[in-house]
Every structure is written in structure tokens, then in C-alpha cells.
Image: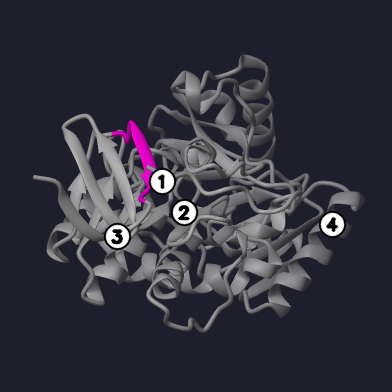
Amino acid sequence: MTRRYDIAVIGCGIMGATAALRAAQNGMRVVVIERDAAGSGASGVNAGTLSLQIKRVSLMPYALRGHAWWRAAGDAVGFRETGSCTLAFDAREQALLEERMALKREAGAPIEFLTPRELHAREPAITDRVVAASWCAVDGHADSSRTGVYLRALLREAGVETREHAGATGIASIDGGDGGFRIDLPGGELRARRVLLACGAWTADVAARLGVTLPIRVRVNTVSVTEPGPRRLSAGVGHATGLLTLKQKSSGAWLIGGGWQGRGSPQEGRGEVVAETLLGNWRLARFAVPSLAHVRVIRCWTGFEAWVDDHLPLAGPLPGVPDAWVLACVRGGYTIGPCIGPLVADAMLGRAGDLPLFDPARVLASSAPATAHA
């Protein structure tokens, strides 16, 4: 017998899962469909950085609320509030740092500026080549490898049905009757009155099955981890260009990221690490913390990040397809997801949120496409 739901969420990352939780808390019968395991996409392979300093000014209200969600999750996700500093190594970078951080501070982030002397008093392991730095005491990180376990537990407690390792082989809107959608899975089909596409880098592919072409691009971000070593750094470290996230975990291992690009595409499976960009990331990290020269990298991996040209989220109705919604392309989505997921769920249920969404129709160059029917 075909199972029927009020809402089907395609994608069990931090955004899809928190949207599903909000819908279930409002009495909806919800199913979450995930092609792999819960939290195994971008939500589970990122560097776990929860820094307000690297968020866009226009997204700061969302980042502040999302950051509070991670803090409340606490030990369950390995949350640590360590503070973080962002470094500038020359006059050009200093001007960039001061301009950007001043705007973020005006937007609500508790950021202050440090002199090199003040920075070194806090973190002696950082290079003496720093000419300026900013500091945010509430910044920290979580253990992204715990994301899926935590989300799965929350969904189970809320009564949300989760279909893992069950990628949708087809999706179509239903013409006539009560409408809604038919979603084909390896073990059969299910039907839902509404659908939310929250599948990250795969969102464009799923939207295309409903007749909508979303101009989503994909980054292939690289992350690496080192062998454990002596504890030398307490805070997180970033760079004025945004090309570095660096932290030392409680185990003594160093986690290094910053958006350096690998190669590959979601359609091909997992991305591939590119040696040249890995070395560039590593050199910047070693420049920031010279003692890294004596530590070996033991593992590298990639994760896909979806984005559109204006670098703002797609969060709202899917153009031309009644009762279909999209939530994707949220830069800094690991931090912001727990805020924007519930906002989209509220909008799907006709509830007004206290923060605005980001209409996906703005990225479509032509008129809304025709709706696909079963």
C-alpha cells in the first residue's frame, strides 16, 4: 500500500532535518528521504567551523540564531566555544579585514580587533608576521562527524520517518484529486501533499525532474586532518581572504579547511582531492602557525557545496510547481541551517516567520517553467 504524508523532505542534512523537525512539531506527518546516511553530505564532511567572522553580513541574523542552536546541542555534537581570530599579514589584507569585520560587528556579531601583541598574548603559536587581527569570543566548532547521529535521534524522537540509503528514483507532481507528489524509491513509492528539496548539491537534479532548471553551481571543498600532536592552539584561526579555517581538536589533531577546491561533480560521486590546492591550503596554514611544519597530514577529503551567482540562499517556493519548496545554496549552511530550516517549514505551513526567506524565483532568467505531472 502506498504510504501518504503531509510533507516529504528530500535530503537529511542539517537544513532538511531541522525543517522536518519543525513541521512534525506542528502536527504534520513527515518523511525524510536520504540517498546515503543522515548527515553524510556537506553537513557531515565539513570542518565543523561555527564562526560568525566568516558569515556574510546579510546572513548574520540567521547565523546568530543557528549558532545558538549548536551551542544548545552541546556535547551531543562536540560543540566547543573556543573563540576565533582572523589574521591579516599585510596592509591590503588589514584594510580588507577591518572593513569586513566592522560591517559584521554592526550586524550583531560580537567581534573586536586585536593588536599583534594582544593576539600573541592569547595564542603564542600564531606567527609573528601578523599585522592585524579580529577576535570573536563566541566562535567555536562542532564535530561534523556526529551530525548524522544527532539528527537521526532528534527525528526519531519527533516521530519523523526517515528513509536512509533510499535515493529517489523519480518524483512527479500528481494531476487531479488532492494533487501532491509521487516519489519513487527503490522499495516502492510514497505520496506527499508537499515536498521540500533540501538535497544540497543534488538539488538542481531533483528540481529538473519537476521541470525547473535552477542555475546552481557546485564547489568541491577540501578538508584535511593531521596526526595528533602537542596542544599549541586553543582558538580557531582564519585568514582575511577567507581561504583558511584552522583548529586543533582536543585529540591534538589539526583540522584544516578554507574552501580550496578539488574536482568532480555530484553526478560522479565523491569528489577528488587535488594535490596543488591541498598544498596551497597547507602552506597558508603553516604560515599562520609555523609549528605545523612538523606535523603530518594523515587524511584528506572533499565535500560538495551548492551556490548561485548572488551567493544568497534559495529558500522558498519552487517556481512553477505548487506545493514544492526548495532550501539550498546556503553559504555557511552548517551554522545557518538550524535557523533557516525551521523558517522554511513555517512558510510551508502558512506561518509568518520573523526573518525573511530568499525567493528562488529571483535566479530564473526566464518565465517560470511548466509543471511536470505524473
Residue wearing tag 1: 43
Question: What's the residue type where badge 4 is placed?
Answer: Leu
In this rendering, position of residue 254 left or right of residue 288: left
Which numbered disc, 4 or 1, marks the residue that appears first in the sequence? 1
> SS of the residue at dot 2?
helix
Residue position marked by numbered label 4 in the rendering: 96
**First along the sequence among labels 3 and 2:** 3
Quarter of the image holding residue 320?
A: bottom right
Query: Toward the viewer: 37 or 226?
Result: 37
In percent of width and height, residue 250 lies at: 35, 46
Marks 1 & 2, CB-CB < 8 Å contact: yes
Question: Can see residue 55?
Answer: yes
Vertical arrangement, residue 338 with respect to residue 273, above or below: below
Q: Are marks 2 and 4 in contact (CB under 8 Å)?
A: no
Mark 4 closeness class: few <14, some 14–19, many ≥20 residues within 10 Å: few
Amino acid of disc 2? Tyr
The answer to whether the residue labelled 3 contacts the one labelled 2, judged by CB atoms less than 8 Å apart, is no
Q: Give, as a three-letter code, the residue at label 1.
A: Ser
Residue situated furthest left in the rendering: 1
Tell me the residue that label 2 is attached to: 334
Q: Residue 177 got which mark?
A: 3
> Residue 83: x, y in percent?
52, 63
Q: Residue at x 41, y 70 (%)?
A: 348
- Camera-near label (1 vs 3) is 3
Q: Which residue is depicted at the point 68% across and 77% down? A: 107
* For discs 4 and 1, the disc positioned in front in the rendered view: 1
- Stretch in magenta: 167-174
Q: Is residue 361 left or right of residue 207?
A: right
- Give the number of the mark in front: 4 or 3: 3
